[in-house]
Image (spheres, helix red, strand yellow):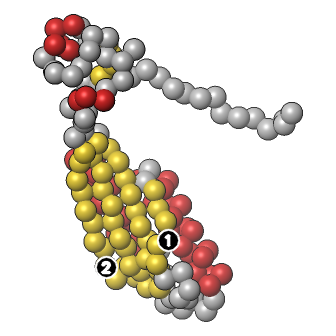
């Protein structure tokens, strides 16, 4: 058995039971179905960020800088980040950033801040940022029942 401490799981029930009259308003939902109080849409955004890293002379130096960019984005925006292109080039990198939120405003805020966070490091020049935001509607027929 390990002596390392682990963080306790913090699963909290944020969904609430709806009354039978609320459920009757939506075809396909059954009595006792757990639903959230919002509209159930999943809003998501993805971005492709091309960066130029002048002055680097090795892939090791590039990896260090790319990891710092990834960590800053993950820490400040709570998004997923991966190097998706230019892995064999010393001074170029392409990052893929993905975020999901319960509102379109939340996704837009994250996508708008990506460039500013990366450009804080004076060793990095952002060449291009392209992004896309959309949402998925809930499928009313596949709601889990309790």
Marks 2 and 1 sit apart, C-alpha to C-alpha, by 15 Å
Q: Which residue is mark 2?
A: 128
Does dot 1 land on a helix, a strand or a loop? strand
| Residue 103 shows up from this direction | no
Which residue is drawn at the image coordinates 23% and 48% (left, top)? 135
Q: Nearer the viewer, mark 2 or mark 1?
A: 1
x%, y% of residue 92?
47, 85
Rendered position, 88 above or below 114: below
* Residue at horizontal 56 percent and vertical 75 percent from the top: 65
Q: Secondary structure at mark 2?
A: strand
Tell me the crowding category of disc 1: few under 14, some 14 to 19, or many 20 or more residues within 10 angstroms, Cα based: some
Residue 137 numbered mark, or none: none
Picture coordinates of residue 132, whole percent (x, y) = 25, 62
Badge number at residue 83: 1
Name the spot of residue 34 as percent of width and height, x first: 33, 19
Relative depth, front residue between 15 and 140: 140
Image side of residue 1 versus residue 141, left or right: right
| Residue 49 image point, x, y percent | 37, 73
- Residue 72 versus residue 93: which sits nearer the camera? 93
Name the side, left or right, on which 143 lies relative to 125. Answer: left
């Amino acid at each position: 058995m390990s002596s390392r401490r682990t963080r306790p799981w913090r699963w909290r029930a944020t969904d609430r039971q709806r009354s039978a009259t609320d459920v009757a308003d939506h075809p396909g939902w059954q009595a006792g179905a757990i639903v959230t109080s919002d509209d159930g849409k999943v809003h998501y955004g993805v971005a492709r960020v091309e960066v130029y890293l002048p002055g680097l002379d090795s892939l090791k130096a590039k990896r260090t800088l790319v990891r710092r960019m990834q960590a800053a984005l993950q820490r400040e925006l709570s998004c997923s980040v991966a190097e998706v292109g230019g892995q064999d080039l010393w001074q170029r990198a392409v990052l893929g950033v993905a975020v999901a939120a319960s509102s379109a405003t939340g996704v837009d805020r994250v996508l708008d801040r990506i460039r500013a966070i990366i450009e804080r490091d004076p060793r990095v020049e952002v060449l291009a940022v392209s992004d896309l935001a959309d949402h998925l509607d809930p499928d009313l027929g596949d709601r889990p029942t309790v």
